[in-house]
Amino acid sequence: MKFQEIQKLIQLLADSNVSELTIKEGEFEITIQTDKVTQQVVVSAPSAPAAIPVAPVTPAPIAASPASPEVKEPSSDSDTAESVPSGVEQKSPMIGTFYRKSSPDKPAFVKIGDTVKKGDVICIIEAMKLFNEIESDHDGVITKVLVEDSSPVEFGQPLFLIEPA
């Protein structure tokens, strides 16, 4: 097979939808491959990340269920009717795993009764192996912790109730 014929085959392969071509002539064998299969995988890849936000939706109610007992325990020390309507919600800015402290041997960033200012770090949310410090959106006093430590959270899920200062 001549070099010009091989060049023609490569050009034909590039212009077609075929990703691999093998030709045998006696003892001579040539295989030409293109990366069109890789391009198709890249094109179909956006459908996989679209499924990722759907997966945490299932754990979120699980996170809400354990949070209910936690909310009830601290409320036995304070008046629940006052705390719920008068507090503003600090919501999760992302999907991930909620942590109240920077490491297991460190104290929690905030606890019930702590005064926070806008911009103070109040928790961490781990998303895709990155630990993101979450800052308070409000000045005030933490009245409730609505999520259990190490629980999955959704975007927009309430994390804390803060009594405005």
Image (tube, grey):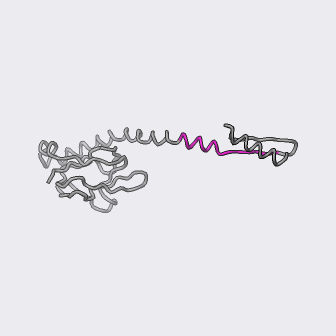
> Vertical placement of 64 versus 131: above or below?
above
Going by the image, does 85 lie left or right of 136? Answer: left
| Left or right: 79, with 101 as reference point | left
Instruction: Measuring from the top left, give residue 148's x and y in whole percent.
Output: 29, 48
Which stretch did the figure color magenta?
Answer: 29-44
Kindly identify the residue that appears in the image at 38 percent across and 53 percent down: 126
- Front one among 89 and 77: 89
- The part of the image, by quadrant, that contains residue 65 is top left
Residue 31: x percent and y percent?
A: 76, 45
Q: Residue furthest bottom?
A: 106
Q: Is 150 on the left or on the right of 52, as rendered?
A: left
26 lies above or below 131: above
Quarter holding residue 1: top right
Quadrant assignment for the C terminus: bottom left
- How many marks on residues? 0
Image location (x, y in percent) of residue 100: 29, 55
Viewer-nearest residue: 9 or 124: 9
State yes or no: residue 37 in magenta: yes
In the image, taking residue 50 as reference, residue 17 lies left or right, namely right
Q: Residue furthest right?
A: 26
Task: Determine which quarter of the picture holds residue 37.
Answer: top right
Nearer-the-camera pick, 144 or 27: 27
Q: Position of residue 7 (x, y in %)?
A: 77, 46
Looking at the picture, tell me which residue is in the foreground, 101 or 15.
15
Residue drawn at x 27%, y 47% as measured from the top left: 91
Residue 7 magenta-drawn? no
What residue do we see at 80% from left, 41% from top?
23
